[in-house]
Amino acid sequence: MKIKKNSELRDISILFDRRRVLGVAMVAVLAGMTGAVSAQSQAQNFPSKPLKILVPFTAGSGSDVYARFFGKKLSEILGQPVIVENKPGAGGALSVQSLKAEPADGYTILLGSNSPMAVNVVTVKNLAYDPVADLRPVAGMTRSMAVFMVSNDSPLKTIKDLETRARQLPPLNSGTYSPGYQLAAAQFTSQAKAPFQTIIYKGLSQTLTDVMGNQIDLAVVDSTGSVSTATSGKARAILVTGDTRHPELPDVPTLKESGYPEAVHYSWTSFWVAAKTPDAIVNILAEAMQKALAQPDSKVFIEKTGAEVMPFGPDAMRKFQLAEIERFRRAAQDSGFKPEE
């Protein structure tokens, strides 16, 4: 038998290696094609079953109200039932973890407000999730400014009154129910060099009750739940944190126009899905939400709650989220805010 030369053996080995590489490459290509076809097939059939919206707050909250309203809109547009499930707790972390535990197929949507999607990054140590890496935006929905409110018989009537009182002792007691509103106030207190003694409540109702009863000097609360209290004469609004004045409180100045241009704050709501949700499915959901937001009754409904439409698409919502995280980080640094453990 003729022995092959070393050069011939080397050529055979090279040929074998090339075939093996080509084979591996073909498997990878086919796997990629299969994945692409699968994702395309999923998108073509989406949605083919009921969808679920996770809300990180209790039933009856502003976020819950918006989830139910736009859940109904999505159901009408997409032709599938939409179920709203409240999962409050841990500042929104429970809802985010529930979303991450579901398949990234677009059937589970998170209603993310500024607290779990931006504020928690700054205010919570060792946050159990990453709102940028773990989630991708579908649409912005609403935004609402904060209101500085006092009792009807409070001596605080103007920005000058607030500045003077806040620089005196004992410290001015400010009530709120979210670190986000605490940071909204911090954009004023850090520039005015007038620190508040902040008391954190469990919700809006008790905060308003205590400010109306003079248990606290000031309440910093969301306009969606407090404008009606002010317009009905139960308490007095002295400042708002919007870019412009609130349409239902035309006589109440903004902090911005009162010499605090950085003290602009809005709370907001938006829809999110798991980070690995296919682009095609995100696009379907995003287009459906833009249709829902553009309907005249959506604008009327949102404005009745004291908020305004924030119709961001996925890219605009991501840019906005990143800018908000930076804004809250600056406010925390300027005011010496200490994160929760």
Image (tube, rainbow, N blue to C red):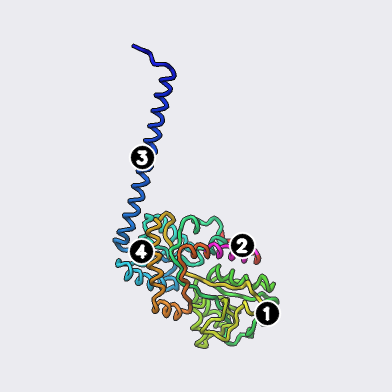
Residue designated by label 1 = 165
In the image, which is nearer the foreground, mark 3 or mark 1? 3
Identity of the residue drawn at 37% across and 35% down: 23
What amino acid is found at the position of numbered circle 4 in the picture?
A: Lys
Q: Which residue corresponds to mark 3?
A: 27
Q: Is residue 151 above or below residue 92?
A: below
| Amino acid, disc 2 | Lys
- x and y percentages locating residue 188 in the rendered image: 64, 73
Question: Disc 2 on helix, strand or loop?
Answer: loop
Report the Cα–Cα distance between label 2 and label 1: 24 Å
- Quick one: label 1, few (<14), some, or many (20+) residues within 10 Å? some
Residue 163 visible, this orientation: yes
- Identity, as a three-letter code, of the amino acid under mark 1: Arg
- Residue 9 position in % (x across, y down): 41, 20
Q: Is residue 331 magenta?
A: yes
Question: Is tag 4's residue or tag 2's residue first in the polypeptide sequence?
Answer: 4
- Per the rendering, the mark at residue 196 is none
Pick the residue in front: 13 or 81.
Answer: 13
Rendered residue at 37%/61% (across/down): 108
Per the image, the residue denoted by label 2 is: 338
Extent of the magenta region? 321-333
Res 43 → quadrant: bottom left
The x and y percentages for residue 247 are 52, 83
Q: Cα distance, mark 3 to mark 1?
A: 72 Å
Q: Distance of mark 4 from mark 2, alpha carbons?
A: 35 Å
Disc 3 or disc 4, which is closer to the eye? 3
Give the Cα separation between the discs numbered 1 and 4: 48 Å
